[in-house]
Amino acid sequence: MDNIYELSAHEICKLIRRKEVSVEEVITSQFNRIEKVEEKIKAFLSLYKEEALDEARQWDKKISQGKKIPPLCGVPIAIKDVICIKDKLTTCASRILQNFRPPYSATVIDKIKNAGCIIIGKTNMDEFAMGSSTENSAFQITYNPWNRETIPGGSSGGSAAAVAGREVPIALGSDTGGSIRQPAALCGVVGLKPTYGRVSRYGLVAFASSLDQIGPLTRDVTDCALLLKIISGKDKMDSTSVNYPVPDYLEYLIPDLKGVKLGLPREYFVEGIEKEVREKVMQATKVMEDLGAEIEETSLPHTEYAIATYYLIATAEASSNLARYDGVGYGYRSKEKLDMIGMYKKTRREGFGDEVKRRIMLGTYVLSKGYYENYYGKAQRVRTLIREDFEKAFKKFDALITPTSPTVAFKIGEKIDNPLQMYLSDIFTISANLAGIPGISIPCGLGRNGLPVGLQILGKPFDEKTILRIAYAYEQNTEWRKMRPEI
C-alpha cells in the first residue's frame, strides 16, 4: 500500500494485526511522505529514519514468530522537542540547548515505546514552549500545511503541522496555556490537554511547572483516546502526577449525546472573535443539540482576568525554571573569556531568543522584593477565583463548549512584533491551564480563506472520558474529520 501514511493510528494497528501490512512498510511509507512534503512544512528538527526502520524490522520479526504485540505496535509518532529522549538532541528549539542530549528519557517516552510506538523524530516549537505561532524557534519557522503563508499555531506547531500534513498519524505536544489545543485548531487536527496531574511531567523540560501538561495531537478522536490511555497514570518520578484510575477511553466513544448537559460561556463569544469562527462554533452546537445534548448559556465571570493572571504566574515560574541555563553545567556557553557574572550574562544574552528574554525579565520583576505580593500573590488569588468559576459551572453542566482560538491562522510575521496581540491568541485556552481542567480541540469547519476552525470542549477534572465522548459524537456526525490540506 502506497498511501499508508493517510491512515489513522487505529487503522494502522488493525492492518498490522491482520498481517495485511508489515511495520517496515508503515515506516517506509511515512518517511516517503516526509521526504515529499517536509521541505514545504518544516515540522521536524530531527529525524531517526534508520533507527525507526531497524525497530520496525524487529517488530516484524516478533510478529512473524507469533509473539504478543502491544496496543500501538508499529505506529509512527513524533515528539515535541521539549520532551527528553535519552541520548537524542533535546533543544527546546533554543540555541542555549542546541547540543543537549539528556541522560534519561521522559516517562511518556518509556510508555509509548512499551506500547509499541516507533518514534520517527522531534518536532519544531516555540523556544521553551513560549509562543503561539512557532515563529520563536531558534532554528526554523514551521508552515501551516493549509496555507504556507500562515502560522501553524504554537507552541506545539511542529507536532500539529506534522499530523495535519500526514507526516505522522499521532504526535505528543505540551500545553501550558493552549500550546496543544490552539495549533490543533489552526491546523485542523485533534489536540487534548489532560487534567493537571493526569500525565507525568517527568522528562518534560519545564516552562511553568504548575501549568505544563503533555498531551496528544491526532487526526481523529479515537486515536486521541488511544494515546491518552497509554501516557496517563501516576508516576513515582513526578510528585504532581495523581494516582487516579485511568479508564479505557474507547469504551466511552459513542455517537450520540443523550442526557449530556453543555454550557456555552458568554465570555467566550466577545468582541474580537472572527465572524466565521463564531458561526462555525454555533453551527456545531446545533449538531450537538440534534444528537440529544441540552445546551444553555452560562457565565464564567472572572475570564476577563485570565490573560493577566496567566502572564504573571507563567512568567514567574519561567524565570525560576530557566535560571538553570547559565553556561556552567550543560548547554551553550559563551566563548568569550569573562568573569563568572560576565559569562552568565553573555551566555544568556546569546543563548535565549527575544520572547524568552521578555518572559524571564517580566517573571523576575514579578517575583522581586516589593512586587511579589502585589503581582504574583494577587495572580494566585485570582487563579483561585477562575477555578471556582469552573467548579460552579460544572455543578450544572457536564462540559463547556467554546471556540479554541478567536481567529483562524494568521500570516507569518503578522503579530511577531506585537507581543500583546500574540498573547491574545490564547485568550480562550489559558483558563483551563489555570484551573487545571482538561480540554480538547476538534475541527468544526473552515473559516476565513478556507482555514480550519477549532471547537473547544472543557471538562471536569479527570473527566477526559466525557469530553472525548462529546468530541467523538460530534466528529462522527459531521464530515470535518475528513478534511485535509493539499500540499
Image: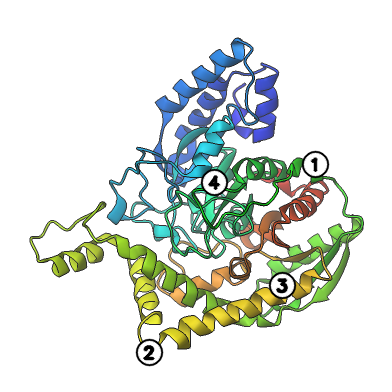
- Please indicate whether residue 138 sits to the left or right of residue 282 in the image: left
Q: Residue at x 43, y 65 (%)?
A: 413
Residue nearer the viewer, 222 or 45? 222
Q: Quadrant of residue 320?
A: bottom left
Question: Circle 1: is it few (<14), some (14-19), or many (20+) Cα within 10 Å?
Answer: few
Q: Is residue 287 above or below residue 123?
A: below
Q: Which residue is more in the foreground, 405 or 221?
A: 221
- Name the element at disc 4: strand
Any mark on residue 172, and which? 4
Q: Earlier in the sequence, mark 1 or mark 4?
A: 4
Q: Name the kind of residue labelled 3 in the image.
A: Phe
Q: Which residue is mark 2?
A: 370
- Amino acid type, label 1: Glu
Q: Which residue is mark 1?
A: 251
The quarter of the picture where the C terminus appears is: top right
In-image side of 265 versus 486 (left or right) = right
Q: Residue at x 14, y 68 (%)?
A: 342
